[in-house]
Amino acid sequence: MGSMKYNSEQQRLIELQQMLRIHNHRYFILNDPVISDYKYDRLYRELLELEEKYPSLKTPDSPTQRAGSPSSDAFVRLEHPGPILSLDNAFSAEELRAWLQRIYKLDQRVDQAEFVVEPKLDGLTVVLHYENGLFTKGATRGNSEIGEDITDNLRTIRSLPLRIPPDPERLAPPQRLVVRGEAFIRISDFENLNRTLEEAGERTYVNPRNTAAGSLRQLDSSLTAKRPLTLLVYQIVDSSDQLPATQNETITYLEQLGFPTPDYDYCSNLESVISLLDKWEHRRQKLDYEIDGVVIKINDLELADNLGIVGKAPRGAIAYKFPAQVVNTTLEEIRVNVGRTGVLTPYAVLEPVEIGGVTVKQATLHNFDFIQEKDIREGDQVMIKRAGEVIPYVMGPVKELRTGKEELYKPPTSCPVCREPVDHHEGEVAWYCVNLSCEAQLIRNIEHFVSRTAMDIVGLGFKLVEQLTNEGLISTVADLYSLNKEELMKLEGFGDKKADNLLEAIKQSKNQPLDRLITALGIRGVGEVVSGTLTNHYQDLHALNQATVEDLENIPGIGPNIAQGIIDWFNRSSNQEVLQKLQERGVWPTLDINETGVTGDQPLADLSFVLTGKLQKHTRQEMKDLIQSAGGRVTGSVSAKTNYVLVGENPGSKRDKAVELNLNLISEDELVELINKTTTRK
């Protein structure tokens, strides 16, 4: 073909084929699309029209002849029992009517056809295999004939039934069953996931669809298990039993087998379908998962099957795509928000633009690495996406529209709220303000300081902290220890007893041990376990203040990032002022590190423990303190390096993981006995 001469339309056809292959690879394999769905659909339809005009150039590997892209070489191939097809698209009522007219010419029974309307889920297609009711394997769609075996990852999805049906006495499972569904992440779960990652200073995700796809294609299924994936099943691909005759009966049967299934509407004719489209588009905004349209299926499965396939799509179904929720606008300025944990998060100030009936003026930019990776500049024309109730986000710049006036962006060197220098470690995503008195995070810092695992000031919850802060009575954690009854009595909701109780609780907190105070300071990376470790080496905060990075890194369990975080925290003059006030007000516990409650060798030295389930004889904190006082370490997750898993009532997945790794399971009584066997208490 290289020696052939092409006219401009033929050349455009060849360019479109290659362009869409690249976009397919980025979407299906890399999970990193660079154009909107709307733009892709426009290019795809242009290619379809050109291939109809020049059929000799419609090659077998054209994007119009394939569903998806080849599987990743990292996964084992799994052949599907039948083709896992995608759908042709329609964008208007007229195009739906034209679809019906085309298939009517093939089978006039279509004129009396009934339809089922289902949401077009924006996730990752999965194919699930069951043998005698047991889930045996699962795969991605791949190239529609062969997918990637992701069985281990699929097993981590809690909504996927590992055995069907729930009650085998009422309904016998087929000897063989293969079903198709969509794996995705709910919008609320996605927002919670990103919020948690942001507070931990980790990289956040761009959108639910890519996050779900990337999670299911992890080589380590334990990483998949940490993602809030869910599933909806809507099609039977293959079965040893007789299949239901209609699509609505299929969904009912799948529900009876125990599968989660999508909501749907039954319609007696196509005009009824068309009358529902506005309702579905309105419903889209209220759903807790992303959809970009609806799927319209002929309800009679035999009729649908007889209509056959054209290219990569069945004739008996079509996808109606909603108007695009991706638009272009000008990024006027990049600003920074300081979160309640001190994490700095950039956001875009936009030239106002309407998306789906909502005027959008701001959009998230995720993190500073995202800005750099996408080369987003102030003044750029950028693509903005809004789906459902998800906060609008910037997908990337439209570089072809640059004028040369756009300005490169650099992360701030100081906090935009308190103007203190920001903290960033090489290799980490997050940038932090570590000023304990920063106004943007003051309430959160005080709330953490008074919490049960820190200074444990009873009665001082979030609302009261907010009230004290808003009234100007406290501007640092040290100000808690200068509150007086006269001030408190002026506040709404305070009487004699409440004021006395609060002041007494604050006074009692001065008796908390050193590790509690270190935890309360909220130093990045320094929780209960690390605080306990530090008290084995430093007798008070003065001594810890004098430590060097090298000193800290030599302590087992403290790595370079935590060590540097401690040094950075103490290097802030604002934090030093707070420490001085705490000492002046009598909040300065000391510990003689040569004294211990245990004589002889510590019985749990160098042993690590994980706690799971509800404890009966001790609180969780009491048990942690007991383990740490005997030289042991308490960690949050089970691994091959864990020595014991302390199991209470109703243990969770940590116990299962411990059994899988053949670790030692131990009860409260057994732990106490283990300590008492090898030590004598003073």
Image: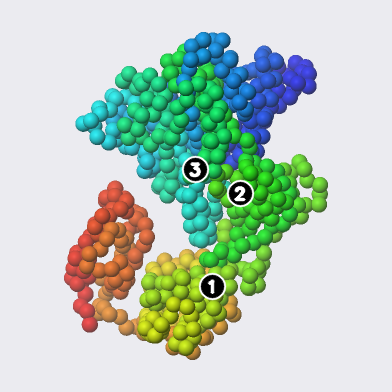
Query: Of 21 and 475, which appears nearest the observer?
Result: 475
Q: Which residue is mark 1?
A: 442
Q: Secondary structure at mark 3?
A: loop
Q: Which amino acid lies under the numbered mark 2 shown in the image of this protein?
A: Pro
Q: Nearer the viewer, mark 3 or mark 2?
A: 3
Q: Which amino acid lies under the numbered mark 1 shown in the image of this protein?
A: Leu
At 59% from the left edge and 32% from the top edge, which residue is drawn?
321
- The residue carrying pointer 1 sits among few (fewer than 14), some (14 to 19) or many (20 or more) residues within 10 Å by Cα, namely many
Q: Which residue is mark 2?
A: 392
Query: Of 354 and 207, which appears nearest the observer?
Result: 354
For the residues labelled 1 and 2, the Cα–Cα distance comes to 28 Å
Q: Which residue is mark 3?
A: 287
Q: Secondary structure at mark 1?
A: helix
Query: Do the CB atoms of the residues marked 1 and 3 lie less than 8 Å apart?
Result: no
Instruction: Tell me the quadrant of the picture where the N terminus can be found.
Output: top right
Q: Position of residue 573 (x, y in %)?
A: 59, 80
